[in-house]
Amino acid sequence: MLKDFLEFINTNQLCKTTDKVLVAASGGKDSMALLNLFVEGQFNISVAHYNFGLRGLASDEDENFVKEFSEKNRIAFYTTKSDTKKIAKEWGVSTQMAARQLRYTWFNELIVSEDFDWLATAHNLDDKIETLYLNLTKGTGPKGLKSIPLKKDKIIRPLMFAEVSEILSYLAAKNISWREDLSNQTVDYQRNKIRHQVIPTLKEINPGLANTAQVNFSRINDLNAIFDEKLERFKQSIDFGEIIKIPFLEWQSTPGFTLMIEEFLKPFGFNYQEVIDLLNATISGKIINSNTHEIVKGRNDWFLKKKWEYTEETNFHFKEPGLYEIGTQSIVLKVTTDFPSIMDIRKSEHAFFDFDAIKWPLTLRNWKHGDRFQPFGMKGKKMVSDFLIDSKIDSPQKNI
Amino acid sequence: MLKDFLEFINTNQLCKTTDKVLVAASGGKDSMALLNLFVEGQFNISVAHYNFGLRGLASDEDENFVKEFSEKNRIAFYTTKSDTKKIAKEWGVSTQMAARQLRYTWFNELIVSEDFDWLATAHNLDDKIETLYLNLTKGTGPKGLKSIPLKKDKIIRPLMFAEVSEILSYLAAKNISWREDLSNQTVDYQRNKIRHQVIPTLKEINPGLANTAQVNFSRINDLNAIFDEKLERFKQSIDFGEIIKIPFLEWQSTPGFTLMIEEFLKPFGFNYQEVIDLLNATISGKIINSNTHEIVKGRNDWFLKKKWEYTEETNFHFKEPGLYEIGTQSIVLKVTTDFPSIMDIRKSEHAFFDFDAIKWPLTLRNWKHGDRFQPFGMKGKKMVSDFLIDSKIDSPQKNI
């Protein structure tokens, strides 16, 4: 197993033994196997365990279990705890969604503050196969066919080559114990249907399903790479001005154009059917709208622009902390008692405000000339317009 | 339903109402729906029914049923009958495989002799979805992700937009009867597992699975189109001499190269693992073999050549009529009492011999200088070498 593990990391260039790797560990079989493989391979790892407090005492026992393994193997151990159910209720989202959001927000904070090279998660090959079938069932594009990516931004998944059965054999051979995560078995209704009803039937047809799937995934990755290469060429032909000009006539008869334009327009809030309607529209001047953008179909080009205007109606009001979806963006409002680290403050996707200085509801609106704010560590106030110039924000982005 | 049918044919440019279309009809629900839609749409169709004689009297009743529908609607009706079980035994293949081979051989004969533009088969959307899951389970490349193609060579599948449930509603609404094909329900073990166990579970997760699948397939088609476009560019860079020279160094770092070289080498009998081994080989001069070809890995190029030599050992002996696999080629030897049509004789993939003039076992070998044969309708003999020159067969192909 160790040999396969090291070879898998090497072949896919996931990380080096000298890299600083943060390992997300729940204490379940996958993460304990991943931890032990990293220990055996003498990698430079630290452990992060999020205690969601969802199962009372059992949750604290999980935390202690991972902590003890870390201490025994002299690995730095990080932990944090939330009342996840309460937060989910406050945010008005499912416990699962809140847990996911909390988890990745905390991991990101650790990566930045402790300067980790990678975050390693313990997803296995069975997870990846299940996710493919889930994605296909619910509708998918090229990325979804790839299923769970092996490497994405700072996240690596070095256990993705292994089946659950191999992981269990490895743990038994090495005499490593783990904690059964009972919530796994009940929470995800759809995944459990795939896991317990669909996959076993497929394995009756092909007992070597896992190996077959690995070859399928390799081919799908190649298809994706070729697609990305062409999508990139397409994007380079687009004029990104205040109004984005898409050279439709030039590209419409190129193989795979529907998929390319769909992928390009997805971040602007357009879906497959809207793209098809626009492609089929014979009238020049046809307009389609997403929540945030509109496209005008010209004779040779498509013109894409933001709909957001400086009117009172398009303002967005936050009544309380929570997770909000605005157009295609998510915004999390969270109250924290910890003083933010300088690394956190510098990250452009975070903004910190003094709780005592704000009034509910908070309003999100475009900036107006004359708007000012008091930056962290500064005595006086600063013009928003100057801040945007200093930050070198491009003109079209200024209003987003 | 008729509106959807006509729109589907139009959008996908399957055929025109004036085209001569041969419709393959078993008498089952799919083919009866397809026939009636073609009749309603006033297309120029003929019907072909193959009587496999697998279910005794019931098979003849199927034939009569389709014949009566055709007569009532004044459609030309073609039929033929085989003792399929006996032929399968003679050929040493499964009944299913023999039936498939017989069916498509006969259809091809009809297309050529009666000059049809298209052969239409009644595959539906459920068939297509099942085939995708079957392909994924058994291992698949880009083509397999496309599942059953809508149009391939002369075959079109105009019913592929419709679910079984829609087809049944249509038949009920139009008061069209059909014959239950009992063999369908038992023969295909793997497909039945997918149909009766996997798909129903997936529909619990997503009741709109069929619509979702159509969007998935549209995206997969686009991925395939982009792949084919790049594969074509790759092929154009290859030097097709007696030894095929593949410019490996030039292409190896291009996105998706593994899949491209795999697809290119598949017809030469190489599989995925052999391609991976060759890609990973660090030694220049490494050689891999398929049954028919070998590849030598040079520093900049790969050299691909035929292994077949003029030795006695590589000759192939046929003891009796049947279906034979030689390398990547299939050869069917079939005894026929019908005199072949001139169209059949002209097709380069068919060869007809006088049964009384041949001796078993037949030997397949490369031609030697001095070989002669007596062509159809000619009194004297002709040199094989002259025949090859007349036929403008390329030098590398001469020995295949």
Image (tube, coloured by chain):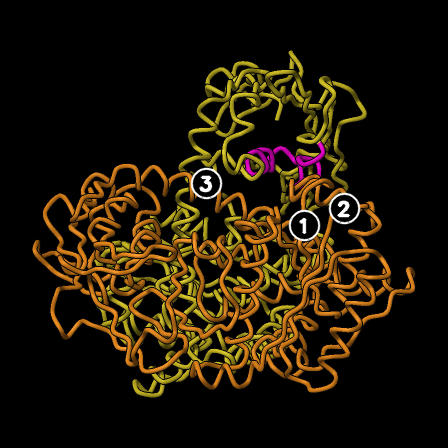
Chain colours: A yellow, B orange
* Three-letter amino acid code at the position of disc 1: Val
Task: Give the CA distance from mark 1 to mark 2.
Answer: 8 Å
Is residue B205 or residue A220 the one in the foreground?
Answer: A220
* Three-letter amino acid code at the position of disc 2: Phe
Q: Is residue B212 above or below residue B117?
A: below
Instruction: Give the magenta-colored segment's residue range.
Output: A261-277
Q: Earlier in the sequence, mark 1 or mark 2?
A: 1
Q: Is residue A367 above or below residue A345?
A: above
Residues at marks 3 and 2 on the same chain: yes
Q: For numbered disc 1, what is the local secondary structure?
A: strand
Residue that label 1 marks: B21
Q: What is the chain identity of the residue bearing mark 3?
A: B
Splitting the image into 4 quarters, where does residue A131 fall?
Answer: bottom right
User: Residue B226: which disc?
Assistant: 3
Residue that label 2 marks: B43
Q: For numbered disc 3, what is the local secondary structure?
A: helix
Residue A185 visible from this viewpoint: yes
Magenta stretch contains residue A328: no
User: Residue A295: which disc?
Assistant: none
